[in-house]
Amino acid sequence: MTSHLPVEPPAFFHRGPSPAARLVFFGLVSIALLFLDARYQYLEHVRQAVAVVLHPVQRAAALPGALLATVGDYFASKRALTVENEALKQRLAATGAKAQGAATVAQENERLRALLGIRVRAEGGGVAVEVLYTGRDAFQQKLIVDKGRDAGVVAGAAVVDADGIVGQVTRTYPYVSEVTLLTDKDHVIPVKLERNGVRAVMAGTGAGRAPELRFMSPTADVRVGDLLVTSGLDGTYPQGLAVARVASVERDTGQMFARITVAPVGGVDRSEQLLVLARSDERPPRPEDPVETEAAKKSGRGRAARGG
Amino acid sequence: MAFRIPSLAPADANEVLRPVKPWFVALTLAAALFGNLLPLEGMALALRPDFLALTLLYWCIQAPRYVGVGVAWTMGLLMDVGDGTLFGQHALAYAVLAYAAEYFRRRVLRFPLLQQAVQVAALLAFCAALVLFVRVFGGAPMPRLVFFAPPLAGALLWPVLSVLLQLPQRPVRSSATL
């Protein structure tokens, strides 16, 4: 049995350019778009315009999940809720004690900084967001969250959950924004070891692979289990937020660098409620760049940390 | 076909179908876009077929007057924004898919649904390979083999989708006459 061949008008009726001509036209336009987007980021305005058309579908697609969650909540047993409530109370008590201590320390810190004449670090608020969906592209690790420019989200802001850094806002639309996760291949974050303050650069390596610390000498003082916190050197991430724990250290003195993999402490692949931290641009202006030679440009390109 | 369910069996070659309604095409494309933006995670995300590519493929084969390279390209742009991917990545892949569908549509339609699914798998995998080429050319690392799971899942879905999308075209009394 064969399927039904659909009826169509005979070819001698004029039906516009042939499919091959259309393919060549649209193919060339696509390649031009790809090139412009990848190399020059010229197309943000076009993207913003298309995003407005797409927005209702994005919102609608989040509804079934939200509905399921509501139904699930409705049928959640009282016992489970009590257990969760207890756990949250304990956690609140634990963090509350720390927070009280932190307030005192912050005041003391401020006084000391004032004494030393150091610029006071700005403490910003944040915007609570919820994950709408995860991007389906296999080559990047991105989330779409439910607040955008109208809620005050700006590109470059750090995104955290209750346990630590999750990623960074890389693009904002009027009502949604894109968050690039720590595990994305193009995501780099300057960190330091909490134990001894050693600075390092942590780079994502793509889906399903552990991020790694780059350019650490084989003799660097790094141990498995060390906590990495943001160093704040990039001016994008506030200082001192938990990022990851060292998962493995391979020292091969024959190699130039140690191979160190880490495991993010934040729920990079599971958290649904996130906080976008406000950016504080309380930094002195960047000193003028020295004139770069071609050789310096080449060697510097791969290492440049992704900044705001 | 021993296990044929009367009203849900694929249309017979002798059956006279009603014409495709443009609003239905638009509706199914919107629904497919919706399916692509559903929040999934873990295995479901890795195996999720590209509903939009599949629906475009179906309409390019069944209704080339309404859906062709241009429509596919436009839907690809929407998908590029939805996923935050490089602008033009899905657009290029879908446009090539639509062209391939128009080129092969007579051949694909000569086969029963299960054999069509095999050819659809090849088309979708080619579409995925094109995206892979674009991204690896742009400096992305090679993804793992699970990258080719969605095209296979899509092909498995093809027979179901074909029957469902053809339902509004079936004559009202087709179940009684079969």
Image: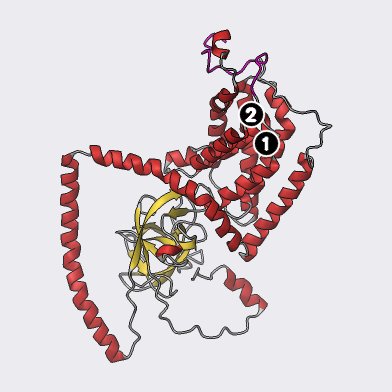
Q: Quadrant of the N terminus of chain B?
A: top right
Quarter of image, res A157: bottom left
Please state the chain letter of the residue tagged with numbered disc 2 in the rendered image. B
Residue density around tag 2, few if under 14, some if 14–19, many if 20 or more, within 10 Å: some
Give the magenta range.
B1-18
Q: Is residue A251 depicted above or below A207 in this figure?
A: below
- In which image quadrant can residue A165 be found? bottom left
Instruction: Name the residue nearer the viewer: A75 or B113.
Output: A75
Instruction: Write the residue at 53% across / 38% down.
Output: B32
Q: Secondary structure at mark 2?
A: loop
Q: Judge from the rendering whether residue A294 lies leftward or rightward of residue B48; answer left or right.
A: right
**In the structure shown, which secondary structural element does the residue marked by tag 1 occupy?**
loop
> Counting residues from the N terminus, which is met first, the one under dot 2 or under dot 1?
2
Question: What is the quadrant of residue A289 in the picture?
Answer: bottom right
* Mark 2: amino acid: Val
Quick check: is A134 in the magenta stretch? no
Asked if residue B50 shows in the view, the reply is no
Distance, label 2 to label 1, CA atoms, is 9 Å
* Residue position for label 1: B66
Residue type highlighted by circle 1:
Tyr
Mark 1 residue crowding within 10 angstroms, few (<14) / some (14–19) / many (20+):
some
Answer left or right for A47 relative to A122: right
Tell me where residue A284 appears, x and y as whole percent.
44, 84
* In-front residue for pair A85/A230: A85
Labelled disc at residue A176: none
**Dots 2, 1 in contact, CB < 8 A:** yes
Q: Where is residue A241 drawn, in percent x and y? A: 33, 67
- The residue singled out by tag 2 in the image is B20
Q: Main secondary structure of the magenta part?
A: loop
Q: Nearer the viewer, residue A215 or B122?
A: B122
- The x, y position of residue A194, in whole percent, is 32, 69
Q: Is residue B5 magenta?
A: yes
